[in-house]
Amino acid sequence: MISTLRVYPLLVHPWPKTAEEAEEIQRRLRPLVRFDGPDRFATVAGLDVHYHGDDELSAAVVVLDARTLEVVEQSLVRGSAAFPYVPGLFAFREIPALIEALERLSAPPELLICDGHGLAHPRRFGLACHLGVLTGLPALGVGKTPFVGEFEDPAPARGSWSPIRLEGEEVGRVLRTQPGVRPVFVSPGHRIGVAAACEQVLRAAPRYRLPEPVRLADHLARYGTP
C-alpha cells in the first residue's frame, strides 16, 4: 500500500497482486476523473520512467516554468517495478516510484505531463488518469505510439490534429507538434479537457516532437541528468 504522503491529498488504495485486482481498481477509480480545471499553469512537470532490465527502474520528474520552459526543479528515484508487466496496467508498475519522485520536490507542480496515456486506454483509466486522481493534480498523457482507438493521420502542419475515437467517444487526439514530424498521442488524465491538453502540449513543444518537460524527464531517467 502507498503510505500517506507529505504534499498530496493522496487517495490510498491497496496495491494489487493480480491483473484482476488491478483492473477492478481502475474501474472503481475511473468515475473520479474530472475534465474541468484551471486554464493556466505556472509550472509544468514532465514524468518518465526508464527500465534497467526487467524490473529495476528510474523514475524522473522535471519541473519547468510554463512560460519560459526553464528548469525549476528535478527529482530522480531509483527502485523496482511494483507490478508485473501487463499491457494496460503500466500505472501499477510505475506510480509508487513516480509519487516518491514527486514527493521529493519542494512544491507540487501545477500540471503533470506523463509519458503515457490517460483516457485513451481500454478502461479509460491510463497512467495520467491514475496519477491525477491519486495526487489531485491536473494531468495529461502524451504517448509516442497509439494504444487504443481509431484515428486518421493529421495534416502535416504544426498544430494539426485528428480525434482518437474509442467506441464512438473521443478519448484523445493525434497531434502534430512539429511540421512533417510524426505526431504524438495526447489524452486528458485528470482536471483537464482534451482541447486544453493539446494546447498545453503545443506550448511545451516549441522545438521538438515531444514536449520539453517529458523530453528532459526522459534524459534524467536514462542518464541521471536532464
Image (cartoon, grey):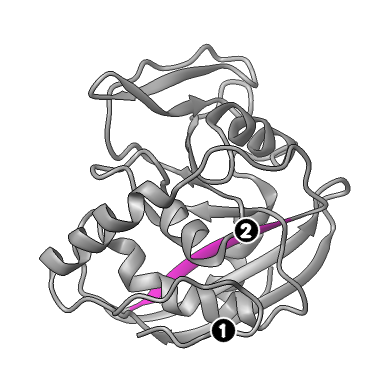
Spot occupied by residue 42 in the image (x, y as percentages of width and height)? 83, 52
Spot occupied by residue 149 in the image (x, y as percentages of width and height)? 27, 28
Residue 126 vs 146, above or below: the answer is: below
Q: What element carries label 1?
A: loop
Task: Give the residue drawn at x 32%, y 42%.
Answer: 124
Point out the tag, 1 or 2, that comes first from the N-terminus.
1
Q: Is mark 2 on a helix, strand or loop?
A: strand
The range drawn in magenta is: 44-52
Task: Give the residue drawn at x 49%, y 86%.
Answer: 78
Q: How far apart are marks 1 and 2 (CA)?
A: 20 Å
Spot occupied by residue 178 in the image (x, y as percentages of width and height)? 63, 28
- Mark 2 burial class by Cα count in 10 Å: few <14, some 14-19, many 20+: many
Judging by the rendered image, the residue that carries numbered circle 2 is 46
Report the side of 66 relative to 14 (left or right). Answer: right
Judging by the rendered image, the residue that carries numbered circle 1 is 5
Quadrant in the picture for the N terminus: bottom left
Task: Give the residue drawn at x 21%, y 56%.
Answer: 87
> In which quadrant of the rendered view does residue 168 lie?
top left
Query: Could you say which is closer to the camera, residue 194 or residue 74?
Result: 194
